[in-house]
Amino acid sequence: MPSKKTTLAPFAQFTYRGKALQEKDGSLTDGKTTFPVRDGIPRFTPDQSYSTGNFSKLRENHATLQLDSINGTTDRLNTILNRTRWPRDFFKGKTVLECGCGAGPDTEILLDLGAKVVSVDIAGVDIAKRNLSKHPRADHVQFVQDSIANLHLKPQSFDVVFCHRVLQHTPDPAATLKHILQFVKKDGYLFVHSYSSSRFQMRRWKYALLPFTNKLPPVLLYKIIQFYAWPTFYLTNFTNKTKLGARFNHIFVPFLNYRSSKKFSQKSNKFIVEYGVHDTFDALSPPYDQPLTPEQMEKIAQKALGGTARKFDVYKDTGMTLLRTKL
């Protein structure tokens, strides 16, 4: 029988224990160890992981909810440009390592902006691939099933290391940050986002409830949130009209209501409630939610990069911490 040939993107260079992996018979191998390639996706991790049940459920139930091309907004595009502070033409032609792609909403924007993307997630990558299968630049993304804490990629081979809304959900965020930074080129760029560890953020309802809710069966937790979503939506529409009410909701009411958000001003209540269910479940289900402090992120970056990469800064506010290269 002829060898089964795969067609992995040429800008994705895979390694195992320092040795290059080559495509052969529908797999990646160094001659001794073999990793399967199914549907054009190298599989370095099992299909089940610590994300199964929470993030996998979001991908299954709301596969396209956050894609700008589907929901008719520019939410993801604006968020990436505002948080990176990089111009629209920055990504064009650059090779980007996307650490944690989920259903692919950021992947879509990176492709739209002209990047060549290696998009990694520990499981469920098939959904992201399916979502972007008809993208005009679908041949410029390589999806990989792998842990971002143990990547099988060539070090210092990416123009940009991009990690958005993922780091705090790994078992060891500090070790994960140190690991992913080794894949940026010496003259490369980085963008790493973490939830804030500020007092304001840590007082939010999710951190009080998470030790209990993330132990519930995910299906049960999801149904509970669905049950109270509409009444809580109407309640918070009213209470969000005052600063005191908004502060009360922030601390005590476990539902994320975006009705007053400008980015969704033209969307229906049904869409807002679905988005609220999605993000509330996302807040209450992860087995890990451990934001790094700005000081931790800066210290790790300084040590890992050793002065070889471009200058970076650490931005912080009450909701997030960003580690990013200055242009």
Image (spheres, rainbow, N blue to C red):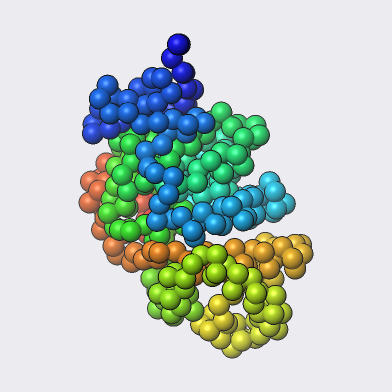
Is residue 288 rendered to the left or right of residue 175?
right
| Residue extending farthest bottom | 244
Residue furthest to the front in view is 1
**Quarter assignment of residue 65:** bottom right
Residue 259 on image: x %, y %: 69, 71
**Relative to 278, residue 103 above or below:** above
Task: Indicate the position of residue 326 as horizontal and vertical percent values.
Answer: 41, 49
Relative to 312, is 286 above or below?
A: below
- To which quarter of the image does residue 132 belong? top right
Residue at x 32% of width, y 52% of height: 177
Compared with 119, 81 (above or below) is below
* Residue found 62% across the figure and 55% down from its top: 62
Is residue 83 among what the camera can see? no
The number of discs equals 0
Q: Quadrant of the N terminus?
A: top left
- Residue at coordinates 46% horizontally, 18% vertically from top-left? 4
